Amino acid sequence: MIKYRKQNALEPEKDAEISLNLTPLMFFAVGYVAMKALLGSVRKLG
């Protein structure tokens, strides 16, 4: 997870925090690469 926090010393109510969760993207990428490798090996066998 990536967190970014922007603080405004003069106006604390304008503080901003952004959090980005990259875990689902990582799972998708790993699954995509694994399926591509699996399909490639199946095609070579056939």
Image (cartoon, rainbow, N blue to C red):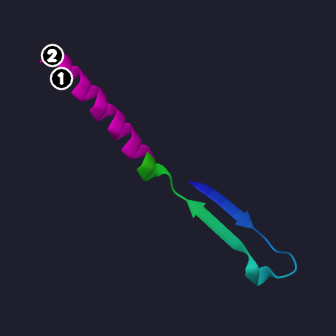
Residues marked 2 and 1 touching at CB (< 8 Å)? yes
Tag count in the figure? 2
Write down the residue under mark 2.
Answer: 45
Q: Amino acid at mark 1?
A: Val
Residue 42 is marked as 1
Magenta stretch containing residue 20, yes or no?
A: no
Q: Quadrant of residue 36?
A: top left
Return the x and y of residue 27 as percentages of the image width and height: 39, 45
The magenta stretch is: 26-46
Return the x and y of residue 1 as percentages of the image width and height: 56, 54
Q: Residue at x 82, y 82 (%)?
A: 11
Left or right of 20, for residue 45: left
Instruction: Give the distance between the C-alpha atoms of the residues marked 2 and 1, in whole angstroms.
Output: 5 Å
Label 2's element? helix
The residue nearer to you, when weighing 28 against 40, is 40
Query: Which quadrant is the C terminus positioned in?
Result: top left
Left or right of 37, for residue 4: right
Q: Is residue 6 above or below residue 21?
A: below
